[in-house]
Image (cartoon, rainbow, N blue to C red):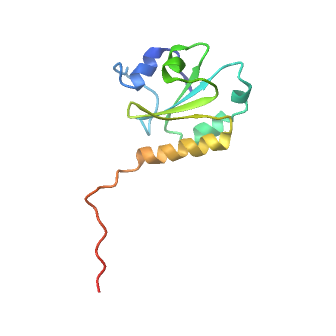
Amino acid sequence: MKLLISHIEFEQLIGLQEPEAGMPGTVYPHFTVIYFTASWCGPCRALDLAAIEAAVPGANWLKCDIDQNDYTPGYCGVRSVPTFMIIHKKKVIDTLTSNNTQKVIEWVSGHALLAVSPPVSASVSAAAPTK
């Protein structure tokens, strides 16, 4: 998990600044999960981060220590840790505050499936049954 150190990196993710070459991620370049944490947070230490990251290995996984980077959690309205935030195509699409590893895995996996699923075309309709 790459450390999200500055507000500039966050602003690049949401499109307020142009991204630099070499942004993290491979499979889902427009799918980012930010993990907001703190070194003193007991519930944060209860999480199995390796299992959570393994659920969606191609995502951009970023870790934001709220004591080192206070701009980003403040901008995002993060009020407690651990909190996870998903950014898809430069938009914050959801947040989750939980120290339940399985709940986080299910939440992230569900959003990842939606992010890579092709949109259903409105012009496709079911064929009329024949008699």
Please provide percent x and percent y for residue 54. Answer: 59, 40
**Above or below, comparing residue 6 to residue 42 in the picture:** above
Please provide percent x and percent y for residue 49. Answer: 65, 34
Please provide percent x and percent y for residue 64. Answer: 57, 21
Residue 14 seen in render: yes
Q: Is residue 3 left or right of residue 87?
A: right
The C terminus lies in quadrant: bottom left
**Outermost residue toward the bottom?**
131
Please provide percent x and percent y for residue 3. Answer: 55, 21
Residue lying at 40% horizontally and 50% vertically, measured from the top left = 117
The N terminus lies in quadrant: top right
Residue 22 seen in render: no
Q: Image quadrant of residue 122?
A: bottom left
Q: Image quadrant of residue 26?
A: top left
**Outermost residue toward the left?**
123
Q: Nearer the viewer, residue 60 or 13?
A: 13
Q: Is residue 55 left or right of residue 124?
A: right
Residue lying at 50% horizontally and 23% vertically, measured from the top left = 76
Residue lying at 31% horizontally and 69% vertically, measured from the top left = 126
Q: Nearer the viewer, residue 68 or 3?
A: 68
**Count of number-bearing discs:** 0
Residue lying at 29% horizontally and 55% vertically, measured from the top left = 121
**Above or below, comparing residue 33 to residue 129 in the picture:** above
Q: Is residue 104 left or right of residue 88?
A: right
Q: Nearer the viewer, residue 131 or 89?
A: 131
Q: Is residue 108 left or right of residue 116?
A: right
